[in-house]
Amino acid sequence: MKIVDNIKDLRLELELLETSKRSLGFVPTMGAFHEGHISLFKNSIKENKHTAVSIFVNPTQFNEQSDFENYPKNNARDLEILEDLQHIDLVFLPKPEDLYLKSSSSISVNPGQKSELLCGMSRPGHFRGVLTIVLKLFNLFQADRAYFGTKDYQQFLLISEMVESFNLPIELRLVPTYRESDGLAMSSRNQHLNATDREEAPILFQSLEMGSLQIKKGENDTMKLIEMMMTNIIENSHFDIDYLSIVDPVSLEDLIEVHSKRPYLIAIAAYISGTRLIDNLLHLPQA
Ligand code: AMP
């Protein structure tokens, strides 16, 4: 496993990989690995001759400096995890000044209107930051496939649209959300939860599942469903809900009516003791 911390060395190492008739899988991350990240790495290892990983806490996608500064970091442990997987060829650990040159700081990707919905409502500029760094990394790595988690579904959707809009020669893969045994979606931010928060946190996914069950049973009214899920969360935890929406998974527009035979996404973001958690339930019935 080669570890590089600058663009020049990254290009050199990628050239070496290219000599061996490669297929390259790429997993962009912000580090502080958990099983969710590991499932992305394993998917890439399965489908590609080589796998490359980037670890970069991207400053431009954070709305608050304190959130950026408090984001969990553990490079030493992350590198051990990657080494233990035995099939990671290349790890890129750049410094912000390496990726963001002052001269180009005003040029960025316009993430379009869907970036203003769901997480975009309370995190203005977040997806502009995400798409810009992902485009830069795609350009640097020139990978054949890139792997993303369903937990950040809106991010995946916007990256897919960027790939389509700019004709980027890369295939995207969406990997299911990896969960703790009680249903809590794994997240680097879970490290910030205290014992009470952690006990209450599974209520998010439990409520999404409760909503989905009611849809299966024939409840079509999204307002009723949202109210039911919100009540369940508010009555059983001290979560402060940012949004809870039932939307079309392509347009991200709110659905007025929902049906189990049609696609829908139930998405939530909520704060607990200042930590923002997100989760979703993506329903894509076979045609
Ligand atoms: P992050 O390091 O949080 O930026 O995440 C890097 C990648 O891992 C993103 O594509 C996330 O969607 C994905 N990811 C995060 N949490 C999970 C999870 N619990 N299960 C699967 N993938 C995840």
Image (cartoon, rainbow, N blue to C red):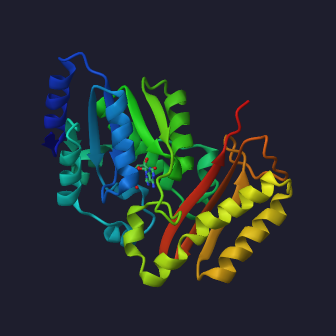
- Between residues 204 and 210, which one lies in front from this camera angle? 210
Q: Give left or right: position of 280 versus 257.
A: left
Task: Check the image and report above or below for 274 versus 160.
Answer: below
User: Can you say which quadrant of the picture contains the N terminus?
Assistant: top left
User: Can you say which quadrant of the picture contains the C terminus?
Assistant: top right
Where on the picture, by quarter, is residue 267?
bottom right
Q: Give left or right: position of 87 versus 186.
A: left
Which residue sits at x=52%, y=53%? 151
- Between residues 146 and 85, which one lies in front from this camera angle? 85
Where on the picture, by quarter, is residue 171?
top left
Which residue sits at x=22%, y=36%? 87
- Rendering coords of residue 99 (x, y %): 27, 46
Farthest front residue in view: 181
Residue 107 in view in this figure: no
Task: Check the image and report above or below for 154 versus 198.
Answer: above
Which residue sits at x=56%, y=59%? 279
Q: Give left or right: position of 249 versus 154.
A: right
Task: Check the image and report above or below for 188 versus 257.
Answer: below
Which residue sits at x=32%, y=69%? 69
- Rendering coords of residue 139 (x, y %): 34, 31
Task: Check the image and report above or below for 167 versus 71.
Answer: above
Q: Give left or right: position of 125 versus 137.
A: right
- Rendering coords of residue 119 (x, y %): 58, 58
